[in-house]
Amino acid sequence: MDYATIDQHVAGFVGLDDPAAPAAARADAAGLPAIAVSPLQGMFLHLLARTMGARRILELGTLGGYSTIWLAQAVPADGEVVTIELDPRHAEVARESFAEAGLDGVIDLRVGAALEILEGVDGPFDLAFLDADKATMPQQVELVIPRVRSGGVIICDNVIRGGAVVDSDDASPAGARGALEVLAADPRVDATVLQTVGLKGHDGFAYALVR
């Protein structure tokens, strides 16, 4: 049985109710790249944020707002999700979904290159989800670590890339590998990597706890 079919079955087992499904449909209709997290991964992020009692969340890479909505549903009414998106068209699609979900008062969407926008973003954040340009992920990690509180968590998505992280010199896997090297060398964090399979194929994420 293929990974996607298994994902669909286990989503039924856990009674997954996807609050971001309309955002996914809007993104598909607008022709955005089909690279958002899966529903089960979205629920993982949501549960992680709730488990932590997260009030402020930072996201790099909004795309159509799918993961953003999962995260925003986890913070309290006076909480905040700051999300950064490079592509203005993607950002506009996401804004429509945020408004439809009644979350535009919780989500602060900023448009521009993550490395540039981050310079003007003040912490502390409880949780950071890095899912933007993988080529610059090492620099993203370096900028995000000081913006996450002690005891906070940083999640870096797509760090396995079907195994390409091991030895590929292409920009994305090389960037993911560089991000893992930054996490391993920085004394301010403790980190691990979990491989994943499912609707998104073979990939994985890094999980870093800020000391």
Image: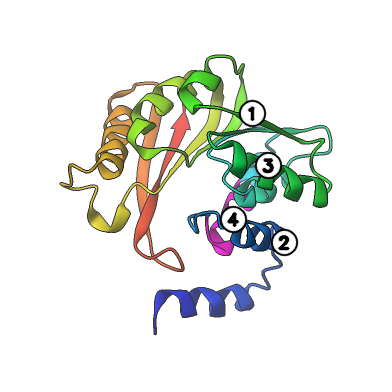
- Residue under pointer 3: 92
Query: Residue at 68% of width from left, 59% of height from top?
Result: 26
Earlier along the polypeptide chain: callout 3 or callout 4? Answer: 4
> Which residue range is magenta in the image?
37-48
In the image, which disc is placed on residue 22?
2
Q: Which one is in front, 22 or 29?
A: 29
CA gap, disc 3 to disc 2? Answer: 15 Å
Q: Residue furthest left?
A: 167
CA gap, disc 3 to disc 4? Answer: 21 Å
Camera-nearest label, 3 or 2: 3
Q: Quadrant of the N terminus?
A: bottom left
In the image, which disc is placed on residue 84?
none
Residue 211 shown left or right of residue 68 in the figure:
left
Dots 3 and 4: beta carbons under 8 Å? Answer: no
Q: Amino acid at mark 2?
A: Pro
Residue 205, placed above or below residue 27: above
Camera-nearest label, 4 or 1: 1
